[in-house]
Amino acid sequence: MPKTETFNRNQVLQNATAVFHKKGYNGTSMQDLVDATSLNRSSIYNSFGSKLGMFMEVLSHYQSLYKSQMGKELMHSHNASNMIKAIFDIYLKDIYGDRDRKGCLIVNCKSEMTNQEPLIKSFMEQNQEQTIAMLEDVVHNGQMEKIFNEDQTAAQYALYLYSSIQGLRMTGILTNNEEELKNLVNTVLTVLY
């Protein structure tokens, strides 16, 4: 009979996220995870299988928080233009609130681990595909509404916007100047109009 977890899984994931976010995957030791989560090693192995298993669950948890936040914001958008602005505003708010300049856990992981671990590469590919598909849908709707131009296909613009978001997240690690970042976003978005 499997053991019942006696800890708050969401709290453990939050604590583990903080460590992985600060130190990266390679820089985080099992002892760091023990210290951060207050679980012993055997509980971590029993509940998550391995450090990699815990990290994969942390990535999924982090991704789901972003998706939830994105969904809430997009519900209030009345057209594709507002949706694209809302998406970039979410990332800008995250950058402004990042006092430790950690950056985005997923973007950081992408540069650190994608070419080192097949499970992480698969996760990153799926995350990228889902994000680009969402952006493509918004752009397509904007083109149908005659808000966005049709100089490029919705798929081409979606990849451009995705790449711009990735660049914005990396730029935000070193630049926290709100005016500069807003100007950068405005420059990115002018391509659509």
Image (tube, rainbow, N blue to C red):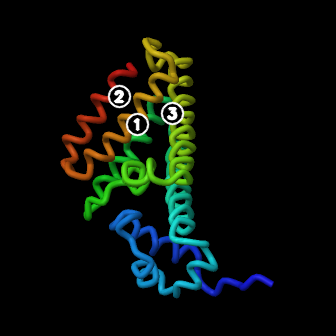
Q: CA distance from mark 3 to mark 2?
A: 13 Å
User: Disc 3 or disc 2, which is closer to the eye?
Assistant: 3
Residue 99 placement (x, y as % from top left): 26, 63
Nearer the viewer's eye, disc 1 or disc 2?
2
Circles 3 and 2 in contact, beta carbons < 8 Å: no
Q: Is residue 114 above or below residue 97?
A: above
Q: Give the Cα distance between marks 1 and 2.
A: 8 Å
Which residue lies under the disc numbered 2?
Answer: 189
Mark 3, residue position = 135
Mark 3 and mark 1: span between their CA atoms?
Answer: 12 Å
- Is residue 21 something that shows in the picture? no
The amino acid type, in three-letter code, at marker 2 is Leu
Residues at circles 1 and 2 in contact by the CB criterion of under 8 Å: yes
Helix or strand or loop: what does disc 3 sit on? helix
Crowdedness near tag 2: few (<14), some (14–19) or many (≥20) residues, C-alpha within 10 Å = some
Image location (x, y in percent) of residue 72: 54, 50
In the rendered image, the vertical position of residue 94 relative to residue 184, given as above or below = below
Q: Residue at x 59, y 76 (%)?
A: 9
Task: Identify which amino acid the numbered label 3 is placed on.
Answer: Leu
Q: Residue at x 35, y 21 (%)?
A: 191
SS type, badge 2: helix
